[in-house]
């Protein structure tokens, strides 16, 4: 028995003790499924320990759990903010001055956390609904932005289309919402852009941002409230 097999055996015993119900792996990746409730700190310890033993990346799959901290959102909020949202909104400034204000960046981060993070996992398709991508934008909403906003602004439309797969003559707009973070971010920002509201003086005023989300993005009196946005935002930790 080689050293790798021995280490995998040690890992399996350790995982059983930690309540991990399923294990699979390859030469390049270990995949663990946890069948018991565990908070983000516990998941992080499991990930770190197993990765140290096996010397290869580890993916943790969990059941639906409450949000405990940023590690349970699957997408790191700080990286999403700095590597996707900020640069995308800065690029939008060419056509929409003010698009990248700090409050707008924070609003979009909070929108992702509230809209798509369920049970500690970032969903790319709404459960029992049509919304798609990390911002949970409905295809009808995206179509309305194209038809009734970008359709009358050719330069802006060209800019947004430039974010999509250029080698496809007729791109799959729904798939772009799912897999293209820059495009999805732009569409989410335009959804807010088309609404009239006052920005808070403090860009970190989470309750004010939650009110904007609830009034102009959620717009559903029966599902989702300001306190839900605030709770999801705070649960992700500092970013």
Image (cartoon, helix red, strand yellow):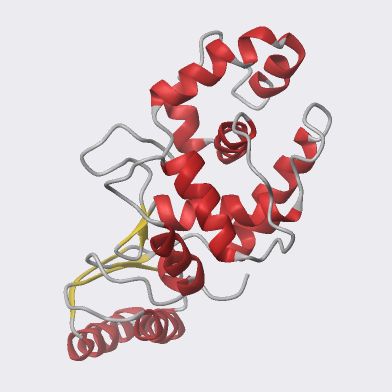
User: Which image quarter holds the N terminus?
Assistant: bottom left
**In this image, 5 relative to 205: left or right?**
left
Say which residue appears at 49% left-offset and 72% top-offset.
70
Please provide percent x and percent y for residue 231: 43, 69
Total numbered labels? 0
Side (left or right) of 78 relative to 211: right
Front-lying residue, 54 or 70: 70
Quarter of the picture holding the C terminus: bottom right
The residue drawn where x is 34% and y is 41% is: 220
- Seen in the picture, residue 188 relative to 226 is either above or below; the reply is above
Residue 168 shows in this picture: no
Left or right of 49? Residue 97 is right
Position of 129 relative to 156 (above/below):
below
Quarter of the figure with residue 79: bottom right
Residue 3's spot in the image, x, y percent?
Answer: 36, 84
Residue 75 visible in the snapshot: yes
Residue lying at 47% horizontally and 66% vertically, measured from the top left: 230
Between residue 134 and residue 149, name the one nearer to us: 149
Camera-side residue: 24 or 73? 73
Of residues 22 and 174, the one nearer the viewer is: 174
- Picture quadrant where residue 119 is located: bottom left
Could you say where residue 127 lies in the image, as x and y percent from the top left? 24, 44
**Left or right for 81, reference 179:** right
């Amino acid at each position: 028995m080689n050293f790798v097999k021995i280490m995998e055996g040690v890992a399996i015993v350790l995982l059983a003790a930690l309540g991990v119900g399923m294990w699979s792996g390859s030469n390049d990746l270990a995949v663990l499924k946890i069948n018991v409730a565990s908070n983000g700190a516990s998941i992080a310890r499991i990930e770190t320990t197993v990765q140290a033993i096996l010397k290869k990346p580890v993916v943790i799959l969990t059941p639906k759990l409450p949000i405990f901290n940023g590690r349970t959102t699957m997408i790191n909020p700080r990286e999403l903010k700095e590597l996707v949202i900020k640069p995308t909104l800065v690029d939008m400034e060419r056509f929409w001055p003010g698009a990248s204000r700090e409050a707008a960046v924070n609003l979009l981060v909070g929108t992702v956390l509230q809209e798509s993070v369920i049970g500690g996992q970032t969903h790319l398709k709404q459960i029992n609904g049509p919304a798609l991508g990390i911002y949970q934008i409905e295809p009808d909403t995206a179509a309305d932005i194209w038809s009734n906003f970008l359709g009358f602004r050719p330069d802006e439309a060209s800019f947004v289309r430039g974010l999509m797969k250029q080698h496809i003559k007729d791109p799959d707009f729904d798939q772009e919402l799912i897999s293209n973070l820059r495009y999805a971010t732009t569409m989410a920002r335009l959804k807010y852009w088309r609404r009239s509201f006052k920005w808070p003086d403090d860009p970190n005023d989470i309750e004010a941002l939650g009110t904007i989300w609830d009034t102009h993005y959620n717009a559903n009196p029966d599902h989702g409230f300001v306190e839900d946005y605030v709770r999801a935002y705070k649960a992700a930790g500092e970013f």
